[in-house]
Image: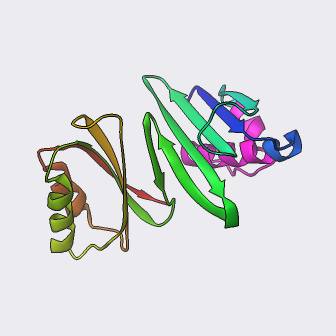
């Protein structure tokens, strides 16, 4: 990881922004280091690892109030994740890279890129049913009809590796990953 950009689109005071940024850094750094990471040492560890961290606060033309965007850069790529906290404390992922959706960040999730063509949802649903994996919720984002779609599928149980392998063999599926939140 070479850079982390954290944009908070909110009227919140800086005293509220710092803990949000520290929490994001903590979550990212825990995945890439064996050191103990906490809210206090996360900014220092990022600096020690040469990770440039930028924080931007302000209101701009965004679709959601209190939007938090985190973009992580590494050699050869980057990933953008956007989230909001709705009234009542309900968190939602509202953007993954260039795809907008509204998904619950909880439990086991199958994240899949696929061609946006008829039959994909049916094939995936039938395959998951064959392995007795129940879909709790399925959210999709796409940029245009007939292009590429991103599926965020909350499932009730962690599917075996064979399920992910079988999903990857579906012709219209271009990438599939299992994520535990």
Whether 79 is drawn above or below 19: the answer is above
Whether 7 is drawn above or below 82: the answer is above
Judge left or right: residue 52 versus residue 2. Answer: right
Q: Give the range drawn in magenta.
A: 19-47
Foreground residue among 89 and 23: 89
Main secondary structure along the magenta-highlighted residues: helix
Quarter of the rendering occupied by the N terminus: top right
Q: Name the residue rendered at 41%, 64% in the picture.
A: 108
Please state the horizontal and vertical placement of residue 41, each as a whole percent of the image: 78, 44
Foreground residue among 121 and 41: 121
- Furthest-bottom residue in this view: 132
The stretch drawn in magenta includes residue 17: no
Q: Name the residue rendered at 60%, 44% in the picture.
A: 28
Q: Can residue 153 be seen in this view?
A: no
Whether 60 is drawn above or below 108: the answer is above
Q: Can residue 72 be seen in this view?
A: yes
Quarter residue 127 falls in: bottom left
Please state the horizontal and vertical placement of residue 88, each as a whole percent of the image: 68, 67
State the colouring used for the structure image: rainbow
């Amino acid at each position: 990881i070479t850079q982390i950009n954290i944009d908070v689109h909110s009227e919140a005071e800086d005293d509220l922004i710092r803990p949000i940024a520290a929490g994001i850094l903590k979550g990212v750094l825990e995945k890439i280091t064996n050191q103990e990471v906490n809210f206090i040492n996360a900014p220092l560890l990022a600096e020690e690892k040469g990770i440039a961290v930028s924080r931007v606060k302000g209101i701009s033309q965004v679709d959601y109030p209190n939007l938090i965007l985190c973009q992580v850069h590494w050699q050869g790529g980057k990933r953008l994740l956007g989230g909001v906290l709705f009234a009542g404390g309900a968190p939602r992922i509202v953007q993954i890279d260039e795809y907008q959706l509204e998904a619950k960040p909880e439990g086991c999730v199958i994240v899949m890129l696929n061609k946006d063509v008829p039959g994909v949802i049916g094939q995936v649903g039938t395959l998951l049913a064959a392995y007795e994996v129940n879909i709790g919720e399925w959210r999709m984002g796409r940029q245009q009809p007939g292009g590429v779609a991103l599926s965020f599928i909350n499932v009730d149980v962690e599917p075996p590796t064979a399920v992910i392998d079988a999903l990857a063999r579906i012709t219209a599926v271009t990438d599939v990953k299992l994520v535990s939140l």
